[in-house]
Image (cartoon, helix red, strand yellow):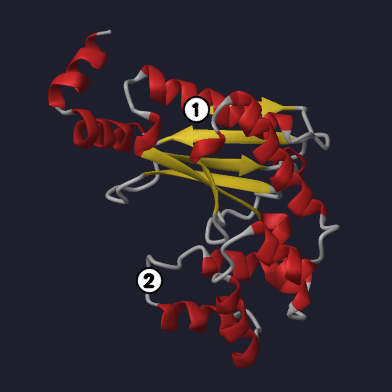
Amino acid sequence: NLDVVGESSVSAEAQILATAAAALRSMGLPDSAYQIRINNRALLAELLATLGIPDSQHAAVFLALDKRGKIPDDEIAKALLAAGLTPETVSKAFDLLAIRSLDQAAAIVGAESAALADLRELMRLAALYGISDRLVFDIGVIRGLAYYTGIVFEAFDSAGQFRAIFGGGRYDSLLTTIGGAPTPAVGLGFGDVVVVDVLKACCGDAAVAVRADV
């Protein structure tokens, strides 16, 4: 795992992702072999607010929508109804997942959104690190765990064959909930088995064996 603790600016997310990209490159994975999908749970909260969904229901909505593609939509809809959403609001919540760009999101929440500003800043910093070609905005990246508070991310192989190579995000409230002082933090965890599978699919068993020897 990799964490940056005590830094509230988006530079922490940028550094985490640049480090992960450097690690994948050092393992022999071509830059073109994966994408890093990014989102912001604060942006999702703003979008849900436009539907009239109160803050008290956001955690349940995040948890349900995070299962999109893993369980049937009708089961997700049932979970959203159980969380207190109306059938009309459930339909609109699914519609949010059709957003494909930051500009589309801005048209709903407004161009002055702080959550959007953070994502744009991450894109800017990613360009300085030379990894912007791998970053893609994806409204469907939610990270169901309730302690995430801001930007979240997951990396997948470009062919879409495997589970996430790594995932993580900002968790500014976690240390507080376990009794610590308010402390901003960003973390990332690798799936070591998935990394090996992606390397084998991309580079072959021989290349993976060489990397293991190194």
Image vertical order of residue 34 relative to residue 204, above or below: below
**Is residue 177 or residue 54 the one in the foreground?**
54
Residue at 66% x, 58% y is 102
Q: Quadrant of residue 168?
A: top right
The amino acid type found where label 1 is placed reads Ala
Q: Position of residue 158 (x, y in %)?
A: 35, 45
**Label total for image:** 2
Image vertical order of residue 136 relative to residue 190, above or below: below
In the rendered image, the quadrant that contains the C terminus is top left
Q: Quadrant of residue 165?
A: top left
**Residue farthest along the bottom direction in this orientation:** 87
* Discs 2, 1 touching: Cβ within 8 Å: no
Q: Position of residue 135 (x, y in %)?
A: 54, 42
**Is residue 130 or residue 72 the one in the foreground?**
130
Residue neighbourhood size for the residue with mark 2, other residues' Cα within 10 Å, grouped as few (<14), some (14–19), many (≥20):
few
Residue at 39% x, 17% y is 26
Image vertical order of residue 156 relative to residue 63, above or below: above
Q: Which residue is mark 2?
A: 71
Residue neighbourhood size for the residue with mark 1, other residues' Cα within 10 Å, grouped as few (<14), some (14–19), many (≥20):
some
Q: Earlier in the sequence, mark 2 or mark 1?
A: 1
Image vertical order of residue 119 relative to residue 79, above or below: above
Q: Position of residue 117 (x, y in %)?
A: 78, 48
Q: Is residue 176 visible?
A: yes
Q: CA distance from mark 2 to mark 1?
A: 29 Å
Q: Is residue 178 left or right of residue 101?
A: right
Q: Which residue is mark 1?
A: 20
Q: Position of residue 36 (x, y in %)?
A: 49, 42
The amino acid type found where label 2 is placed reads Ile
